[in-house]
Amino acid sequence: MKTTTWLSIFPSTIQELLGKLHPTVLARIEEIRVRQERPLEVNYQGQFHYVNYRGELTDMPGEGYLPTREDGNRLLDFITNHSLYTMEEELRKGYITIHGGHRIGLTGRAVLTKGHVDHIRDITSFNIRIARELKGVGEPILPQLLDFRQHSVQHTLILSPPQHGKTTLIRDLARLISGGQWMHAEAKWKGLKVGIVDERSEIAGCLKGVPSFDVGPRTDVLDGCPKAEGMMMMIRSMSPDVMLVDEIGRPEDADAIREALHAGIRVIATAHGSELEDVLRRPVLNKLISDELFQTYVVLHRSSKGTVNRLYDAKRRLLHPLAAGVKGGSYHA
Amino acid sequence: MLKLIGAILVLVSGTLFGFYQAAQFANRPKQIRQFILAMQRLETEILYGFTPLADALLKIGQQLSDPLRTIFNEAAHRLTDRTNVTAQESWQQSVEEHWKHTAMKQNEKQIIHQFGFTLGTSDRNDQIKHIRLAVNQLQHEEAAARDDQSRYEKMCKSLGLLAGALIVILIY
């Protein structure tokens, strides 16, 4: 059972309550929020509910189970693998990635050294984001990103607001590209070397350097490395054909992307933003976009009906979502 | 004849008991010393190695001899094999369970038990402080134990033999 793997990080009190939830709810939970002395909260499909003492969902905050100090301490002990002292870098950044690629955001009292956050102590709020491997989400999109002339993929920027599946998508793209599953009848070339710079250990969910998720047979993952530096290291050391990075946005990221593009490496990157116009307001991304460095833009949009994706070309013209894929016949496996 | 064998048995067991007590007095400072060294190794693992607690305890356990080895190994195995056990619990339970096999006394146990409360739950600096505090306290106990050793070790040996002899004389 996949669900039980993340349930086991909770102290037995909370584990019991969550275990009583309906399996369909449990299978869809995206976030679990544990706040000391405040009601236990679960989020799924854009909604939130509290969990009461009987392990049922409720919308009344007053009825919710209140995690105790002991619960918080135990949870912290489990998620740090009983060794908080090995997580200083993570505490500086405010989140910990655990086995299975699940990310846990933390807040408490920040301890400053020379005006910078050194670490967090008295941690009382936890946000457990459940990572799910959704194989196949990249299948309808990949055929439209193919570069038939170069037998590769196009430089692509994927945009979406948080929680809309960016990371899941590029994880699946990595799997498809490195496995050579192009989902297109005319694409007959073999899999490519893929490099993932996984700053937050979210794409591959590495544990001790080994990916927890299926990212494909020809994929190298540089885990926990700052993106800009990691991209340069990848270019120098691993000669990837395609490089994947999550959540670009800093000036040094842009420099590294330019470097990669000039080295002949295809880049698939993601950024926060619900529309292309949003992203244009961010100076770093604006420069990359106006220089037409990316050949394709994918904008993810998730509604209650499902995910709707829109594609734009380098000049930011809307492409019909199916236009590119239909050409070679059926692209869906 | 039977009486003589009985008398010899009493004498021998008295002597052995005396020697056993003496050995306890001799082993106590030795084991405290070992524990101090183990704690200092733990400090290195935490400060420079960033080694996760379970691995660190196991590593240290391998370098020790029994009975201390079991305490460290057991604590490590509780952490890796069981879910829903905190570092504090596994440490304290392991100490509780295997303490009787050591020659150490209640004072040392108190220190080591106390140390468990902070084990693994804070940043490196804090961990180091707690380790040093425990080491410091253990060193005090070690000095006391050495005192006891020099005072009582020889006495225990002769006392065992003499007590045996006394019983023999009384019941012969």
Image (cartoon, rainbow, N blue to C red):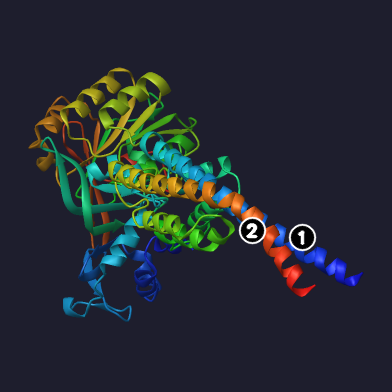
Kindly identify the residue that appears in the image at 59 percent across and 58 percent down.
Answer: B101
Q: Position of residue A261 (x, y in %)?
A: 28, 22
Name the outermost residue toward the right.
B1
In the image, is residue B3 above or below residue A284? Answer: below
Front residue of B54 and B109:
B109
Q: How many neighbours does mark 1 have within 10 angstroms: few (below 14), some (14-19), or many (20 or more)? A: some
Mark closer to the observer (2, 1): 2
Protein chain holding label 2: B
Three-letter amino acid code at disc 2? Leu
Q: Mark 2 or mark 1, which has the lower sequence index?
A: 1
- Compare residues B123 and A135 and report the one nearer the observer: B123
Q: In which quadrant of the rendered view does residue A239 lie?
A: top left
**Coordinates of residue A9 in the picture (x, y in percent):** 39, 60
Tags 2 and 1 on a common chain: yes
- SS label for mark 2: helix
The residue carrying mark 1 is B12
Please name the residue that numbered disc 2 is placed on: B159
Left or right placement of residue A219 versus residue A112 in this view: right
Q: Is residue A238 above or below residue B134?
A: above
Name the quarter where the C terminus of chain B is drawn. Answer: bottom right
Q: Residue at x 24, y 68 (%)?
A: A41
Q: Amino acid at mark 1?
A: Val
Nearest to the observer: residue A32 or residue A156: A32
10 Å crowding of disc 2: few (<14), some (14-19), many (20+): many
Mark 1 chain: B
Rendered location of residue A212, percent (x, y): 45, 46
Residue A164 visible from this viewpoint: no
Gap between marks 2 and 1, in whole Å? 12 Å
The one nearer the camera, B15 or A59, is B15
Q: Secondary structure at mark 1?
A: helix
Q: Does residue A167 lie above or below A129 as drawn?
A: above
